Image (tube, helix red, strand yellow):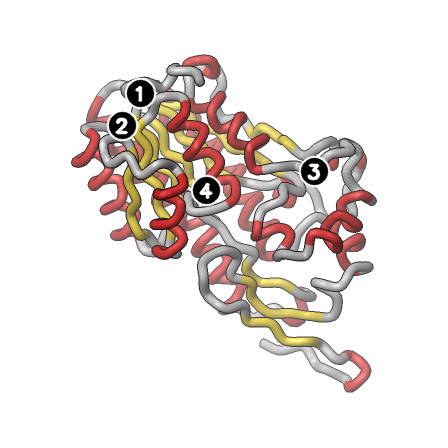
Amino acid sequence: MTEDLQGRVAVVTGGASGIGFASAQRLAQAGAAVVIADVNAAAGAEALERLGGDATRLGFEPCDVTVEAEVARLVERAVARFGRIDVMFNNAGLGGAIGPITETSAEDWQRTFHVLLDGVFYGTKHAARQMIAAGQGGAIVNTASVAGMAGGIGPHAYSAAKAAVISLTRTSAVELAAYHIRVNAICPGAVYTPLMHGGDFEDADRAIATVQPWPERGLPEHLADVVHFLSTSASIFVTGQTITADGGMLAAGPRFIESQKRGRRTSGVAGFTQGSTGRPNEIRRLNQADGDKPRT
């Protein structure tokens, strides 16, 4: 266990599961006090227990990142409790709108952007305000995706939102550099989280085997190590970057969506997926044989 974040304070949105939980655990192991936030309060309470429940170094705040007031309150409470904020990991996410673009409703498109992009904007804005006021610099890390860097990896809305996160990361890094605030993004590939595999490991294994050169599964812990690096002084001269950890998927030229269509989970459906929020998915099966027409 390293102590390179001793005395530092980190906030992790979407911290109840997947990459968020693994990163919260890694940052805590490095000595940081950590506040995890999640819209799924039951999962958040359970995650806090899994982290050890040490109230002197750990906290949980329910937070819907689509509501700016809740994100502002999250940051304010972290500072009130631990005295500062040094790391903001804007990680909360969901699958969002899925299916053909001709079957994607404007509402589902907008809901996807509210979580994946607006949540990053709010987290960056309010964490940066606190960091600037404190005058001690800091690190902001955003979860983007390889889906934001190439076509054919993720659904339309998800991919577009993640591409916007990459752009927001770069522009924020330029603006905040004067305050010694570093802003970077991680771009996971096929990482085995509930959001990615949906509980169907066999289907996910088949899909990934066709697009990822690296033979082992990508795990949340692999990304947590990257988040840890970007949170410490080891990355002091790294800002405005997108760090890709994808087992070589982009290098191989991914066709992830097509490989999934050969599986069972995403073939012939459209709607909205809620990830690990605890809310039910809204999925409908398409029946092109019956002449389904695109919906608005």
- As measured in the structure, the alpha-carbon distance from the residue carrying label 4 to the one carrying label 3 is 20 Å
Determine whether, in the image, residue 175 is placed left or right of residue 96: left
Which comes sooner in the sequence, label 4 or label 2? 4
Which amino acid is tagged 2?
A: Met
Q: Which mark is residue 91?
A: 4
- As measured in the structure, the alpha-carbon distance from the residue carrying label 3 to the one carrying label 2 is 36 Å
The image shows residue 183, relative to residue 149, as above or below, that is above
For marks 3 and 1, give the one nearer the viewer: 3
Q: Residues within 10 Å of mark 4 (few under 14, many from 20)?
A: many
Secondary element type, mark 3: loop
Task: Inspect this view and state whether residue 285 appears.
Answer: yes
| Residue 110 image position (x, y, % from top left) | 48, 62
Do tag 2 and tag 1 residues touch (Cβ < 8 Å)? Answer: yes
Secondary element type, mark 1: loop
| Residue 253 image position (x, y, % from top left) | 79, 38
Q: Which mark is residue 131?
A: 2
Task: Tell me the quarter of the image containing the C terminus.
Answer: bottom right
Do tag 4 and tag 2 residues touch (Cβ < 8 Å)? Answer: no
- As measured in the structure, the alpha-carbon distance from the residue carrying label 4 to the one carrying label 2 is 19 Å
Q: For the point 45% across and 61% down, which residue is it?
A: 278
What residue is shown with label 1? Answer: 137
Q: Residues within 10 Å of mark 2 (few under 14, many from 20)?
A: many
What residue is shown with label 3? Answer: 217
